[in-house]
Image (cartoon, grey):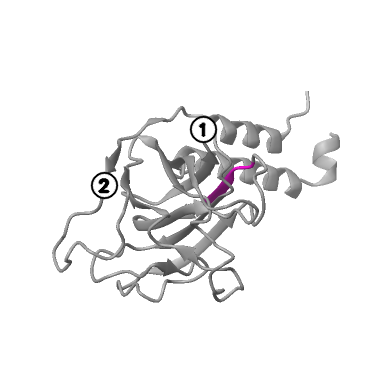
Amino acid sequence: MKLSYTKALKGFCLLALATAQSAGASTTIAGDLPARAGEDGQGIAYNFQMLLDTSDGSSSESWNGVLGSKAWSDPSNVSGNLGIPLGWTHTSNWAYISLAAAANVTINLAANASDLVPAFTLWRGADNSGGNFHTYQQDAVPLWIDAAGFDFIRYVTTGPGPYSGQNAALSLFLNAGEYTVAIGGNDTTTAGHQAAYSFSVTAVAPVPLPGAVYLFGSALLGLVGGRRSWPTSAISN
């Protein structure tokens, strides 16, 4: 029977990657960050904190709350850098996320039996000093944030427009550190009101290939290379 080295290597790799991952340590804390060294505990008023540790493979947390249906962007506000009307700081909900290690992260925001048009912005860093302002730029670093290293990453919105039953979701690789998420609505068709939401974050540790995979692959490549170097006469005899 003819041996397929490519299929053998592929099967071995898939088997190595199929190791079951158990849920890692995770914690959700209601309320704002306390003042830490060099901070006054002001700045962003975080509604909750998620501490995610993927040392056991994966970690997941969720939070349910209510927020303004036009909190992330209100057409009555002036527009920011990309032409998006500014959001309302105090009717949005703010999440603090801490990653103990680099991970593949999925963030999901959904209406929770409401007409929310989900939208959120992700930044790297935390703002826990100074003041804030009643509006914020959701497509850049808000002007009133002065925390060192605070950087805009990405925003996701299912609007602008009416409720359509969609979730706002984002999957990306993030390094260990602190992150901030502004959560709100992007409704342009109804009067502003409170809307319920469900917010979840899942972090999965990258799975390194075991050393045995590299050794096995090197051996197979050596065999393939050896076969290709054999003279035709040696194969036919």
Q: Nearer the viewer, mark 1 or mark 2?
A: 2
Q: Which type of secondary structure does the marked residue at label 1 adopt?
A: helix
CB atoms of marks 1 and 2 within 8 Å:
no
Query: Residue 81 vs residue 1: left or right?
Result: left
Mark seen at residue 31: 2
Secondary element under disc 2, as helix, strand or loop, is loop
* 177 drawn magenta: no
Residue 1 image position (x, y, % from top left):
78, 23
Q: Which residues are magenta?
A: 166-171
Find the residue positioned furthest to the left. Answer: 37
Q: Position of residue 156 (x, y in %)?
A: 57, 55
Residue nearest the viewer, comparing 34 with 74: 74
- Rendered-image quadrant of the C terminus: top right
The answer to whether one can see residue 26 in this image is yes
User: Which residue is labeled 1 in the image?
Assistant: 16
Residue 168 among those drawn in magenta: yes
Location of residue 148 by image quarter: bottom left
Residue 209 visible within the image: no
